[in-house]
Amino acid sequence: MTNSEQTSVLITGGNKGLGFEAARRLGEQGWTIFLGSRDEGRGQAAADKLAEGGANVVMVPLEVTSDASVADAVRLVGKHTDRLDVLINNAGAPGRIVTPADATADEIHSVYDTNVYGPIRVTHAFLPLLRAADNPRVVMVSSGGGSFAVVTDPDQPVASMHELAYSSSKAALNMITVRYAQALPEIKFNAITPGEVVNRKFTATDMNHHTGQLTVTEGTDPIVKLAMIDADGPTGIFIDRLGPVAW
């Protein structure tokens, strides 16, 4: 494991759900938590709660669809540290579960703006701080719904969920993860799904109206695992809490 006393992490969408739980767990390891939140009020409330639990946390106003907001976030984080060890691209949007027949380009664009362009925007902006770290890692929070193998398996619930925006955006995020990993070997880029693919389970969050069978703690297991890999750890992989997931 890395030296937890000096490890810093930025988590987008960190004020609730998987992002908040990942922040709580990594904060318990002694990490410095930069808690990204689109809503400043909710973000500060979440940061205060983490601080009450003993975490070293800085709330970072961060709207991943805004170039200006991301630039402001880089400046704020840069005031506290000269490097960033880990970036967790967690912020995501489910869209309105519009069927392919009814989906429009505008509907797709709104989801891609958060789920695809957002991680690109944030990753690009934070590359200088990541490159300054000894063992930089980027964790992309994807979905089993972004796996061709999962979506084409008739036994998987997502196979019969006829929507276009979310699943295709996560498939794009998976490819983006691999391409970053190939092009930037000095940084470890990996993707996770917070579910259990083999057991056809997913994590209960606001995004699915808390209908999932797994807790947010279970859902963050792969996030924490990949955030804490050492210099010999993997890059360009896709996992859930039980192991590798087929692309």
Image: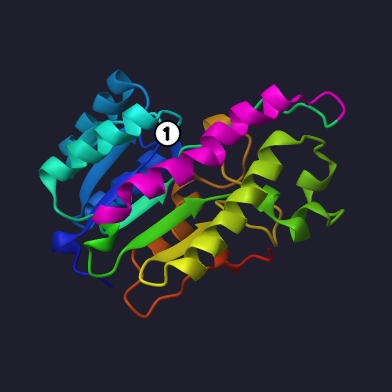
Query: Picture coordinates of residue 218 (x, y %)?
Result: 49, 53
Q: Residues within 10 Å of mark 1 (few under 14, many from 20)?
A: many
Q: Which residues are magenta?
A: 101-129
Query: Picture coordinates of residue 241 (x, y %)?
Result: 53, 62
The residue positioned 69% from the left and 24% from the top of the image is 107
Instruction: Give the main secondary structure, helix, strand or loop, of the magenta stretch.
Output: helix
**Observer-nearest of 126 and 144:** 126
* Mark 1: amino acid: Val
Location of residue 162 with respect to 221 vertically, above or below: above
Query: Picture coordinates of residue 49 (x, y %)?
Result: 23, 32
Q: Secondary structure at mark 1?
A: loop
The residue positioned 45% from the left and 63% from the top of the image is 189
Q: Residue furthest bottom?
A: 232
Q: Is residue 66 left or right of residue 71?
A: right
User: Quick check: can you spot residue 3?
Assistant: yes
> Quick one: quadrant of the N terminus?
bottom left
The residue positioned 34% from the left and 45% from the top of the image is 125
Location of residue 238 with respect to 64 vertically, above or below: below
Q: Is residue 187 left or right of residue 191?
A: left
Q: Is residue 234 magenta?
A: no
> Quick one: quadrant of the C terminus?
bottom right
Dividing the picture into quadrants, the one containing residue 209 is top right
Q: Is residue 90 left or right of residue 171?
A: left
User: Quick check: can you spot residue 37?
Assistant: no
The image's colour scheme reads rainbow
**Residue wearing tag 1:** 64
**Observer-nearest of 125 and 237:** 125
The residue positioned 30% from the left and 27% from the top of the image is 43
**Observer-nearest of 63 and 191:** 63
Query: Picture coordinates of residue 178 (x, y %)?
Result: 56, 63
